[in-house]
Amino acid sequence: MRVLGIDPGYAIVGWGVVEYVGNRFTPVAFGAVTTEAGVPFEQRLDKVYEGVLDVMTTYKPEALSIEQLFYQHNQTTVIGVAEARGVILLAAAKCGIPIFEYTPMQVKQAVTGYGKAVKKQVQEMTRMMLKLEKVPKPDDTADALGMAIAHCHCSRSRLVGTPLR
């Protein structure tokens, strides 16, 4: 199974493609789509859409694993992230890729075995599972790889994320 994990945002969209065969993970590719502050927001959304669409058409994932949006502190930021997430979901829909959402706790549980693990623990376990020399940067890219791993683990259990339709 080939899974694209995405950590959504509008300044940085982390992405990671993972191949999962016989309980073995192989990193296919990973990186980030970045946009510059000060650029009109609609142009930033366009760059996110085009960048993610390029990843999807290049690596042809069988599923998209994306973090469920949750509100923390900054209402302005969450609205921008939601809009960026919308263009990411649109790109997946245009490519016919099934979309699965996971909460941060589900990702932590799937990757580390502990739903209250801290971010650095998840990133380090992701690095180890993918046999990478170091944790990918930016953090959004490492988080995206963790999202992909979470779907691989959860797709074979009752913890499977919520499919979007």
Image (cartoon, rainbow, N blue to C red):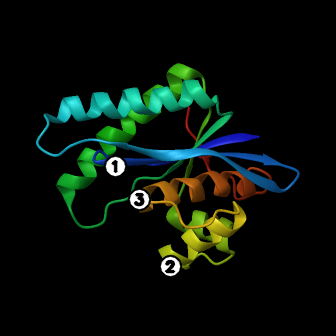
Front position among marks 1 and 2 = 1
Q: Residue at x 54, y 66 (%)?
A: 135
Residue lying furthest right in this view? 22
Q: Position of residue 85 (x, y in %)?
A: 38, 41
Q: Residue at x 30, y 66 (%)?
A: 72
CA separation, marks 1 and 2?
21 Å
In this rendering, the answer to whether 138 lies above or below 128 is above
Amino acid bearing label 3 = Pro
Quadrant in which the C terminus appears:
top right
Q: Earlier in the sequence, mark 1 or mark 2?
A: 1
Q: Which residue is mark 3?
A: 138
Marks 3 and 2, how far apart at CA: 17 Å
Q: Which residue is mark 2?
A: 118
Q: In the depicted view, which residue is nearer to us: 146 or 113?
A: 146
Circle number at residue 12 = 1
Q: Position of residue 61 (x, y in %)?
A: 65, 33
**Residue 160 percent location from the top left of the image:** 69, 52
Give the number of the mark in front: 3 or 2: 3
Could you tell me the amino acid type at mark 1? Ile
The residue that appears at 11% across and 42% down in the rendered structure is 38
